[in-house]
Amino acid sequence: MGRYLNLEIAQAPRSWPLLALGRVAYSVLVYAYMDRAVIGIPHPSGAGPAFHLLFKGKKLRPRILRRLQEALAVSAFNVVWITGG
């Protein structure tokens, strides 16, 4: 892991989940920080439609919002990949 990423993550309260943008970032965070909650979403780069499927108009789709709320409500460490498909 890069020196800066480790320093930045160390500054965040442990109660905050780590948010990974893209599958590679998600995989890295899940294995490098096994003691932290990790939420992964498709990268918004536009390389594929997956990110845009999370939204209906300018709002998160209701089922996506529910999954995020469920993931955040769990008190134990949790890892979840959120997809719009």
Image (spheres, rainbow, N blue to C red):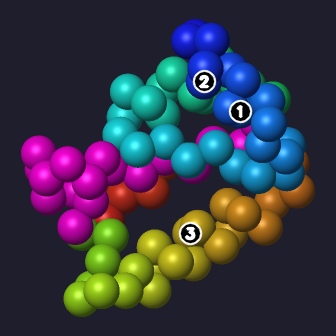
- Is 44 positioned to the left or the right of 17 in the image? left
Q: Is residue 3 magenta?
A: no
Distance between the Cα atoms at labels 1 and 2?
6 Å
Q: Nearer the viewer, residue 67 or 12?
A: 12
Could you tell me residue 76's position as x and y percent?
86, 48
> Element under label 1?
helix
**What amino acid type should be assigned to the residue bearing mark 2?**
Leu
Q: Residue at x 68, y 20 (%)?
A: 6
Q: Amino acid at mark 1?
A: Ile
Please give the residue where the numbered disc 2 appears in the rendered image.
5
Residue found at x 22% / y 67%: 52
Of the two numbered discs 3 and 2 on the same chain, state the one appearing first in sequence: 2
Residue at x 88% of width, y 56% of height = 75
Residue 20, position as x, y percentages in the image: 49, 42
Query: Is the Cβ of the residue at disc 1 closer than 8 Å to that at disc 2?
Result: yes
Camera-side residue: 60 or 80? 60
Write the start and end of the magenta stretch as one range: 36-52
Give the label on residue 67, or none.
3
